[in-house]
Image (cartoon, grey):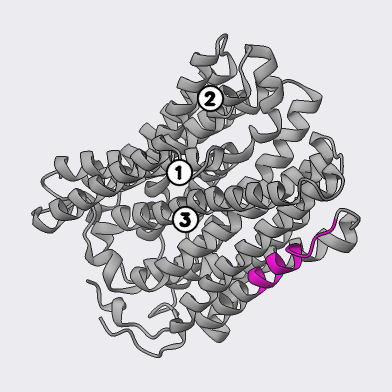
């Protein structure tokens, strides 16, 4: 482990760096731009699903797989993709992932049948998973010191805003053009970024010479299958009860495969994911808080999308635009996070940011069907945006600060996997809470009252999760790591 693993808990880099060269700035623009496309595609289809179903004659159950196929393929492949970048080169794997993602977007936009669209979404998820860990690894290997913190703040701001941008873009494009353009818009943008990446990105010399000599095939198979089964279980639990036989079967299969994966990794000469990354060092200190924060944040986009459309009666465009305050607040504060860290260290922005997220979610837990947007929703959105914008880039920068450059791909894959698993599990739990609360209130009031009661109850549960993230971040106030 690098010496920075024993850095002070303030999370400040051991030395300041010179401003990045113009070429480095272009590399950052390319990798963060592509991550924006990946983030957008998580949510861009939400407001377009009804029209997709009508156009391709899909049932309500089958149309949900337009979203779930992407989620399953992306979340199940991140650990493997992170190590592929370390083994075969981050530039090469990034370009491969970007090419698959862009080609799959074209296929999705031209889909004549339902099975074609769902297959294309699987390929989109695989392409996104291939590219995503390499983007963070390229940032870690391209930038040092304060420049790295600034680069990760841009990365986090863009990635965090991607889901909100997806809702806005999905609503506007679906309403003004066609649902096909939520996919086709990726094609020219993806092709541009592939061309720029091929020209601008160079594989770091140290990464070329220090790549692992062998690839952990057993670890790759068990990790991918285990994560895929786990994500499938969470997705199915969101649509069915946790007692559903297939949900239970997927949970058991995922748990068994991941146990086998851990056994394999302990014995592998060059493991897919070195277990020490998750048990000690800077990354291990922030993983619990990042995972819980990801779970809490997934509630905001899903539940408020239901509230805006089903309770307030917003159309796709208006519902998308209603998320703009969250996106703007998150992006603005994330860009300021490096300056905050230099002034007060890692702990204060992370802990206070997560406290704001918990407060905002608790505020939404008091939501009423008679609340106005300004009176009941705007304040919580701003609090959550400011809080997550302060916390997530800060913790990500700190978590990656103690990583050996040779393992930055695996570390980035682990970091993003935990965020994704946290979010997917969280969404399944919030949907379960929402369903139980609406059933309990179904005989007490109007449909709008019942829906709002269920949404508010789920937000209250998500606030407890954010409070757990806050508690998990408190150890960052310790002055020294003890690894």
Marks 3 and 1: CB-CB under 8 Å? Answer: no
**Distance between the Cα atoms at labels 2 and 3?**
26 Å
Query: How many other residues sit within 10 Å of disc 3, few (<14), some (14-19) or many (≥20)?
Result: many
| Mark closer to the observer (2, 3) | 3
Mark toward the start of the polypeptide (2 vs 3):
2
Residue named by callout 1: 243
Residue 312, visible in the rendered structure:
yes
The residue drawn where x is 49% and y is 27% is 121
Dot 1 lies on which element? loop
Assess whether residue 365 is covered by the magenta stretch: yes
Image position of 399 with respect to 457: above or below: below
Residue named by callout 3: 422
Mark toward the start of the polypeptide (3 vs 1):
1
Q: Quadrant of residue 188?
A: top right
Query: How many other residues sit within 10 Å of disc 1, few (<14), some (14-19) or many (≥20)?
Result: few
Q: Is residue 227 left or right of residue 175?
A: left
- Image x and y of residue 70, in percent: 49, 33
Residue named by callout 2: 105
- Image x and y of residue 381, in percent: 75, 61
Q: Is residue 263 left or right of residue 34?
A: left
Image position of 432 with respect to 236: above or below: below
- Residue placed furthest toward the front: 443
């Amino acid at each position: 482990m690098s010496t920075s693993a024993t850095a002070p808990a303030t999370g400040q880099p051991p030395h300041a760096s010179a401003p990045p060269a113009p070429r480095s700035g272009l590399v950052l623009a390319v990798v963060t731009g592509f991550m924006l496309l990946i983030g957008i595609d998580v949510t861009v289809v939400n407001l377009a699903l009804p029209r997709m179903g009508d156009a391709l004659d899909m049932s309500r159950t089958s149309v949900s797989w337009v979203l779930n196929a992407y989620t399953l393929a992306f979340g199940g492949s991140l650990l493997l993709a992170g190590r592929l970048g370390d083994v075969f080169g981050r530039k090469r794997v990034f370009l491969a992932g970007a090419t698959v993602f862009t080609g799959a977007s074209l296929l999705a936009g031209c889909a004549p049948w339902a099975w074609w669209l769902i297959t294309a979404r699987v390929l989109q998820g695989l392409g996104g998973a291939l590219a995503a860990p390499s983007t963070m690894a390229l940032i870690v290997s391209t930038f040092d010191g304060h420049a790295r913190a600034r680069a990760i703040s841009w990365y986090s701001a863009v990635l965090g805003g991607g889901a909100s941008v997806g809702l806005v873009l999905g609503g506007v494009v679906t309403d003004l053009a066609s649902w096909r353009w939520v996919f086709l818009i990726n094609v020219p943008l993806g092709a541009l970024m592939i061309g720029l990446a091929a020209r601008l990105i160079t594989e770091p010399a140290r990464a070329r010479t220090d790549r692992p000599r062998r690839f952990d095939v057993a670890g790759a198979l068990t990790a991918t299958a285990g994560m895929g089964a786990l994500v499938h279980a969470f997705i199915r639990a969101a649509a069915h009860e946790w007692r559903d036989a297939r949900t239970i079967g997927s949970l058991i299969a995922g748990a068994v495969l991941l146990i086998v994966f851990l056994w394999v990794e302990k014995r592998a000469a060059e493991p897919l994911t070195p277990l020490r990354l998750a048990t000690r060092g800077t990354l291990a200190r922030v993983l619990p808080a990042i995972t819980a924060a990801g779970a809490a944040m997934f509630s905001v986009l899903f539940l408020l999308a239901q509230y805006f459309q089903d309770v307030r009666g917003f159309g796709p465009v208006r519902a998308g635009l209603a998320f703009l305050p969250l996106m703007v607040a998150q992006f603005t504060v994330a860009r300021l996070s490096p300056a905050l860290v230099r002034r007060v260290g890692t702990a204060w922005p992370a802990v206070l940011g997560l406290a704001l997220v918990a407060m905002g979610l608790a505020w939404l837990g008091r939501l009423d069907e008679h609340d106005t947007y300004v009176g009941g929703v705007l304040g919580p959105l701003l609090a959550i945006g400011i809080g997550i914008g302060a916390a997530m880039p800060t913790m990500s920068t700190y978590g990656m600060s103690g990583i050996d450059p040779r393992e930055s791909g695996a570390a980035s894959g682990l970091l993003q996997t935990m965020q994704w698993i946290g979010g997917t599990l969280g969404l399944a739990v919030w949907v379960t809470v929402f369903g139980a609360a609406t059933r309990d209130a179904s005989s007490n009031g109007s449909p709008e009252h019942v829906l709002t009661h269920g949404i508010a109850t789920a937000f209250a549960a998500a606030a407890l999760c954010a409070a757990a993230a806050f508690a998990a971040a408190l150890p960052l106030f310790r002055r020294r790591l003890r690894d």
